[in-house]
Image (tube, helix red, strand yellow):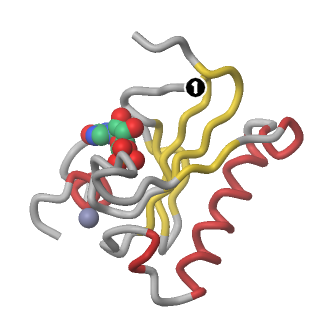
């Protein structure tokens, strides 16, 4: 979708630190991390937010990617958080569905 920053990252029109990619999902480091590990897991299809998901397949694809990513950095053993924000009051700044995967210590706010 035009003017969507995450679609631009998906299309490699703007750079990001990609740590996982498959046919359906991309994951990259958050530009402004709030935890030692802060990865954004994003479906390649432009979907506004979690309430707009209309197929189990999309959720399975995201869950698969999260499991693959967390295997590579020990988070599968240590545990981690997954957060998705929805709408203005939910603190969603980027209107393209994404899951924050947070591991390790939470960083002090600046
Ligand atoms: P939201 O508040 O929408 O749930 O989270 C959006 C997240 O995207 C924020 O944590 C923000 O730091 C991150 N973000 C926004 N723009 C960019 C960008 O251009 N590159 C990367 N890597 N992260 C971004
Ligand atoms: Zn998008």
Quick check: 82 left or right of 38? Answer: right
Quick check: 21 left or right of 80? Answer: left
Residue at the limit of the structure toward the right, as seen here? 77
Give above or below for 75 relative to 89. above
Q: Which residue is drawn at the image coordinates 31% and 70% (left, top)?
A: 48
Image quarter in which the C terminus is found: top left
Residue 73 image point, x, y percent: 74, 37
Give above or below for 94 relative to 38. below
Q: Which residue is drawn at the image coordinates 48% and 73% (left, top)?
A: 24
Residue 55 image point, x, y percent: 52, 89
Give above or below for 80 relative to 98. above
Q: Is residue 16 visible?
A: no
The image quarter containing residue 43 is bottom left
Residue 40 image point, x, y percent: 48, 47
Q: Which residue is drawn at the image coordinates 46% and 88% (left, top)?
A: 54
Q: Which residue is mark 1?
A: 35
């Amino acid at each position: 979708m035009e003017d969507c920053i995450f679609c631009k990252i998906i299309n490699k029109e703007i750079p990001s630190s990609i740590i996982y990619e498959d046919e359906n999902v991309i994951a990259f480091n958050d530009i402004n991390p709030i935890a030692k590990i802060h990865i954004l897991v994003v479906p390649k299809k432009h979907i506004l937010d979690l309430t707009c998901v209309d197929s189990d397949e999309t959720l399975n694809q995201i869950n698969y990617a999260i499991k693959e990513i967390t295997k590579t950095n020990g988070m599968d053993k240590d545990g981690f958080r997954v957060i998705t924000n929805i709408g203005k009051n939910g603190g969603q700044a980027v209107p393209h569905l994404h899951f924050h995967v947070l591991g390790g210590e939470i960083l002090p706010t600046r």
